[in-house]
Amino acid sequence: MAVEIRLTCEKPREEFQCERLKHLVTPGDIITSDTGFMRGHGTYVEEENLVASVAGIVERVNKLVSVRPLKTRYNGEIGDVVVGRITEVQQRRWKVETNSRLDSVLLLSSVNLPGGELRRKTAEDELTMRKYLAEGDPISAEVQSVFSDGSLSLHTRSLKYGKLSQGTLVLVSPSLIKRRKTHFHNLPCGARIILGNNGYIWISPTVNEDVNESTGGFIQNLELVPLTDRETVARLRNCILGLAHHRILLYDTTILYSYEASLRHQCKDIMKPEVMLGISQLVRQRLEIEGL
């Protein structure tokens, strides 16, 4: 019977760059005493000093100074791609959990019905709402507007949004998701990934886009997923959790680099602390070499 033996050793300390340390603040730290700067999110003024109200990284855009928190609830912006889960079916609307302070709203008038029809929704459509999206269904959507209380209004009018089929949901901090032009990626390893700006990441086998166009994104494919595809999804999930643990920004490049670095290990071994640390260091080295 084989026995696995792991020896404890001192882990190398991850060193922050000096430039990053200069911009790292905690609540109560004075950011600047210059009165020429404007106060942004995560700051307040006390005795003519601009003071941080949250722990995070100082960001400057011209004269606007703000602090991006290291860990926070999702604050939505118009145009963001989000992944969520239906929590309640109400009159002419669905409530969606999106990792924000309040549940988001998906109106019946803001969805495409099967066939991609853009038409006025009738009372018959309202009676069959649970047929399209029921409680517990995962969906991808886009932020259409932000209400005065901070809750979000979503829409799925594009055929790339809608109900999500077989896959796995990974939860990370929203601050780790890098804003990109597109958050939908078909990776070369044979998996599709949706990087929600709200910190919810959906990983699934590559889907046929023609099927979504014909069904409007409401039909789930419940066929048996091959073992190789399940292993790929599980490996990507472990790689993403490893990157998030070491505070590396998540986008298609870093996820692909970590996947390639993990191929020398078994899928179950990726979550070991020493393996996770080694993969994250390899990813950082490749990013530095390529200047990303």
Image (cartoon, helix red, strand yellow):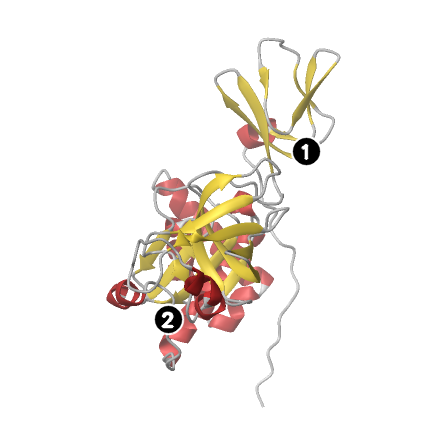
* Residue 5 sits above or below residue 35 on the image: below
Within-10-Å neighbours for mark 2: few <14, some 14–19, many 20+: some
* Residue 170 sits above or below residue 286 on the image: below
* Residue 91 sits above or below residue 61 on the image: below
The mark that comes first in sequence, 2 or 1, is 1
Q: Nearer the viewer, residue 153 or 270?
A: 153
Determine the image quadrant of residue 108: bottom left
Q: Position of residue 226 (x, y in %)?
A: 36, 80
Q: Give the numbered dot on residue 219.
A: 2
Residue farthest to the left, as pictured: 210
* CB atoms of marks 2 and 1 within 8 Å: no
Location of the N terminus (image quadrant): bottom right
Residue 197 visible in the displayed image = no
Q: Give the numbered dot on residue 26.
A: none
Residue farthest to the bottom, as pictured: 1
* Residue 28 sits above or below residue 106 on the image: above
Determine the image quadrant of residue 159: bottom left
In percent of the image, x 59 and y 24: which residue is there?
Answer: 40
**Residue type at mark 2?**
Ile
Residue 13 visible in the displayed image = yes
Q: Position of residue 149 (x, y in %)?
A: 62, 38
Q: Which residue is mark 1?
A: 54
**Residue type at mark 1?**
Val
In percent of the image, x 53 and y 60: which residue is there?
Answer: 85
Within-10-Å neighbours for mark 1: few <14, some 14–19, many 20+: many
Q: Secondary structure at mark 1?
A: loop
Q: Position of residue 115 (x, y in %)?
A: 28, 63
Cα–Cα span, label 2 and label 1: 43 Å
